[in-house]
Image: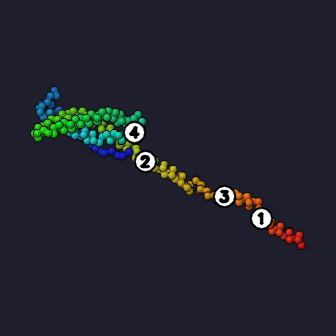
């Protein structure tokens, strides 16, 4: 399992930073009852927040699916039930829907831009600004979901990558021991027996067994000569 790109982690952090920056000033733009003191200034602040959040959400769309696939390939059944990443894996249950809807929103934006391609330069800029504000406003919900699900995805991936790297040396050592165990000359393994000599021709062996030895032949000759005298 390969280490993932740091982009999803930085994207999730960027979404949170954009939202936190807005939260830090939004109250100061409202009265005691929560109504904006300056509608235009308040609206501009929300537009800026949504644009920054969507920019980071698009980074997550480009890199998150690959990391998610790696996490699902590396996680085992027990990881979902208990263990260090069980809570993080639980948080990822709705991430497919979030990514799919965010992808659809970006696809619709591309279609709108394609339709506006033939517009006059002045009108095109105005349309792009209005369409961009609408897209960012719609995408803020998905960006918020990714800011919650993104860190869980990053933590799960880091844990699984570390576990895979820790298991790799043990697997390599087991393979080395297995190879050594079955290598000729290894300790505890007797060396291979030398090859057996070739088997002689059975017919020749039979003739050799039936024929008298040279010593017997010489004894018969001596006896015959003694009788002739």
Q: Secondary structure at mark 3?
A: loop
Rendered residue at 25%/38% (across/down): 57
Q: Is the image coloured rainbow, by chain, by secondary structure, or in one colour? A: rainbow
Instruction: Report how far apart the C-alphas of labels 3 and 4 lie in the structure.
Output: 61 Å
Vertical placement of residue 104 versus 208, above or below: above
Vertical placement of residue 135 versus 205, above or below: above
Residue carrying label 2 = 168
Q: Quadrant of residue 131?
A: top left
Q: Is residue 111 visible?
A: yes
| Cβ–Cβ under 8 Å for marks 1 and 4 | no
Mark 1 and mark 3 lie on one chain; the one further toward the N terminus is 3
Instruction: Report how far apart the C-alphas of labels 4 and 2 lie in the structure.
Output: 16 Å
Which mark is in front, 1 or 4?
A: 1
Instruction: Report how far apart the C-alphas of labels 3 and 2 lie in the structure.
Output: 51 Å
Rendered residue at 59%/56% (across/down): 191
Which labelled disc corresponds to residue 199?
3
């Amino acid at each position: 399992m390969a280490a993932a790109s740091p982009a999803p982690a930085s994207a999730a952090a960027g979404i949170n930073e954009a939202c936190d920056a807005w939260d830090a000033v939004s109250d100061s733009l409202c009265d005691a009852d929560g109504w904006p003191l300056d509608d235009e200034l308040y609206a501009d602040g929300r537009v800026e927040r949504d644009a920054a959040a969507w920019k980071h959400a698009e980074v997550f769309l480009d890199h998150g699916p690959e990391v998610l696939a790696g996490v699902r390939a590396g996680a085992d059944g027990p990881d979902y039930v208990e263990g260090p990443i069980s809570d993080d894996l639980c948080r990822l249950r709705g991430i497919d829907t979030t990514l799919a809807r965010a992808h659809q929103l970006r696809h619709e934006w591309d279609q709108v831009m394609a339709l506006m391609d033939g517009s006059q330069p002045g009108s095109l800029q105005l349309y792009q600004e209005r369409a961009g504000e609408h897209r960012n406003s719609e995408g803020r919900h998905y960006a918020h979901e990714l800011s919650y699900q993104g860190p869980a995805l990053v933590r799960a991936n880091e844990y699984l990558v570390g576990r895979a790297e820790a298991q790799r040396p043990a697997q390599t050592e087991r393979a080395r021991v297995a190879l050594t165990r079955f290598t000729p000359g290894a300790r505890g393994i007797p060396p291979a027996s030398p090859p057996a000599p070739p088997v002689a021709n059975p017919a020749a062996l039979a003739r050799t067994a039936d024929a008298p030895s040279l010593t017997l032949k010489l004894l018969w000759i001596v006896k015959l000569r003694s009788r002739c005298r």
